[in-house]
Image (cartoon, grey):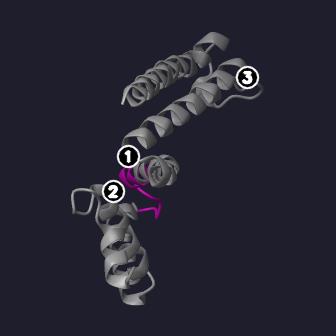
Amino acid sequence: MNLRSFTRHLINDERGSISALEKFGLFAAVFVLLMFIPAVRGIVGDLFNATLGQVDDNGDLTGTAIAMRGILITIVAIVAFAGSGYLLLYTDLGARLAFMVAGAAIFGWLAIGSMLFVVYAPRGLRPANLTGLNAFQIRIPAIALTLTALILFLMFVAALDRYDKEQGDV
């Protein structure tokens, strides 16, 4: 196998074109490489400060800047956590099966974690904005998250079972 056929095999799928996931991966790789260039890094830093580094008269970050940073951090964390697991599974299992396995794993983990919060809710000193809440009221969001994650986990497990039965018939 020569280099040309290897690279063609590497970037082409069954349809003969690059998939959306591979396009995103190439974009991310180019972006990371560009961050090593000081001028590009400076432009990205200036753009970050213009949008997420807004300060008020006292020199403190504005509420909008704090909210935008929180939203950006949440999106990046979800993409990094769920995306890295999906990407590893995608390389071995294919897109469809990897999505179902990653979904079942993420929602199973979320159900276990939220159930632990329901059982072992924070004790001791509470922040001022939680005063007046009893022990059950503090657990309501965690209970809702547990039930939602459990339902989604069971849906992914049912989809995996159906996929397995379809593959067994072939």
Rendered image: mark on residue 21: 2
Bin the neighbour count of mark 2 within 10 Å (Cα to Cα): few under 14, some 14-19, many 20 and up: few
Return the disc, 1 or 2, that comes first in the chain's sequence.
2
Residue 26, relative to residue 4: is it above or below?
above
Q: Nearer the viewer, residue 158 or 70?
A: 158
In magenta, the rendered stretch is 57-70
Q: Image point 50% across, 49% down: which residue?
A: 89
Residue type pointed to by label 1: Ala
Q: Secondary structure at mark 3?
A: loop
Residue 131, relative to residue 104: is it above or below?
above
Q: CA distance from mark 3 to mark 2?
A: 39 Å
- Judged from this view, the residue extending furthest toward the right is 124
Return the disc, 3 or 2, that comes first in the chain's sequence.
2
Q: Where residue 27 sits in the image (x, y, percent)?
A: 32, 69
Residue 19 on the magenta span:
no
Residue type pointed to by label 2: Leu
Q: Image point 49% across, 20% down: which residue?
A: 154
Residue type pointed to by label 3: Tyr
Question: Quadrant of residue 76 in the image?
Answer: bottom left
Q: Are the two marked residues, 1 and 2, in contact with CB atoms closer than 8 angstroms?
A: yes
Disc 3 target residue: 120
Q: Are the two marked residues, 3 and 2, in contact with CB atoms closer than 8 angstroms?
A: no
Mark 3 or 2, which is nearer the eye?
2
User: What is the quadrant of the N terminus in the image?
Assistant: bottom left
Mark 1 or 2, which is nearer the eye?
1
Q: Secondary structure at mark 2?
A: helix
